[in-house]
Image (tube, rainbow, N blue to C red):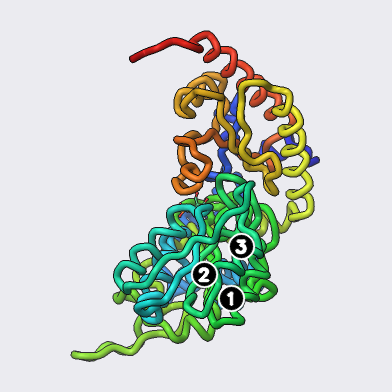
Amino acid sequence: MFDVLKLRKMFPIYENHPDLVYLDTGATSLKPQCVLDKMNEYYQEYGVNIHRGVYHLSYLATNAYDEARQKCADFLNASFEEIVFKRNVSEALNFIALTYGEEYLQEGDVVITSELEHHSSILPWMKLCERKKASLRYVKLDSEGRITIDNFKKALDSKVKIVALTYVSNVLGYITPIKEIINLSHKIGAKVIVDAAQAVAHFKVDVKDLDADFLAFSSHKMMGPTGIGVLYGKKEILKKIQPLEYGGDMNDEVCLDSVTIKEIPYCFETGTPAIAEAIGLGRAIDLINELGYDNIKSHCESLKKYALEKLKDIEGITLYNPHCDLPILAFNINNVHPHDAATIFDEANVCLRAGHHCAQLITKWLKVLGTLRATFYIYNDYHDVDRFVESVKECVAFFKQFEGDNYE
Ligand SMILES: Cc1ncc(COP(=O)(O)O)c(C=O)c1O
């Protein structure tokens, strides 16, 4: 285990809320001081625009921004030009649907997705399929709610042109066997778009090893700032797609009735970008490297095991994913709406998520209105799990009083 108390000193929110039990990293992670400092350093020491100025400070800002992009490239084992900055995963996935999808999907084609997806990984494809008269096909989930290779093979045929799947489910914490899925998809010529929103904070994502065509992640779920995310695209595919937006900084020469555009990735980024945020994301990547994925993984795994062990003995709850791969626990207090239950957790200063987690299809698949979701990360410890478990027990006891009451 990490020395969590020491580690927490890196996260100023704990100074302001010493009693906080933060179990909502799945929604967004806490932000460490080093990331905030790095962003402030930009604003205070060289906070000018990039790619434009011909003066020293502008070179400094441009270099820092480029360095951040290179860090993202190294982080994913990609190259510099394959990293396009977007606001977040949602924007990145919409961008692919509106560019690559618009250009290459045709009437009668099929896009494979799953009921495990976050809305960001379904809706852009649903709307694209509507426009193109193509169809969306859902991989059947197994009895636990996982995407399996067997079921994926059943969904795959020559009509499939795009496969858009999550690497890690934000509700059930399952890891999709994405490498094999990519391999199978490529055999029939389909392109694969990976939603890595919940993956990058937990394990190494290597786009070359996966052979992913596109992959997206958001900085804010991995200790970086909000407002910036990364779209990875294979060089040869990015070169074939047209920009979605036109304006400053993405063009070379502008004439009265024509424009030549810059090379990738610049042609996909118009206007002044999120400079401080990119630099902050670069610092968050450094921090993950400093902490080491092996340590992050073993820490989170031990918290997950400890929590599962404790929850096992509590009567009156339903846990939907006892075999989750990552520390994302979905559960309900029996016969209690998750939003009602959440108020009890809130009173105990235990922050967790309640509802459908922007993944309504999987809550429907589970046949519930929503779930409570607790996610653990590096700044959590056994004490947090104990406080969480205490709140679960309190919640069960509290609502038990009203069992059988009829409010109609
Ligand atoms: C699996 C998954 N995909 C996509 C998203 C969307 O991320 P963002 O809100 O940063 O665009 C999330 C956020 O919760 C997620 O968990």
Tell me if 205 is positioned left or right of 138 in this view.
Answer: right
* Front position in the image: 12 or 149: 149
Q: Nearer the viewer, mark 2 or mark 3?
A: 3
**Image height check: is 250 above or below 127?**
below
> Does label 2 point to a residue whose CB lies under 8 Å from ligand 1?
no
Query: Residue sitting at 56 percent across and 38 percent down?
Result: 24
Q: Earlier in the sequence, mark 1 or mark 3?
A: 3
Numbered circle sitting on residue 336: none
Is the residue marked by circle 3 packed among few (<14), some (14-19), or many (20+) residues within 10 Å? some
State the mark number for residue 163.
2
On-image quarter of the N terminus:
top right
Q: CA distance from mark 2 to mark 3?
A: 14 Å
Looking at the figure, which quarter contains the C terminus?
top left
Q: CA distance from mark 1 to mark 3?
A: 13 Å
Residue 308, position as x, y percentages in the image:
72, 34
Q: Secondary structure at mark 2?
A: strand
Residue at 51% in and 12% down: 403
Disc 3 target residue: 151
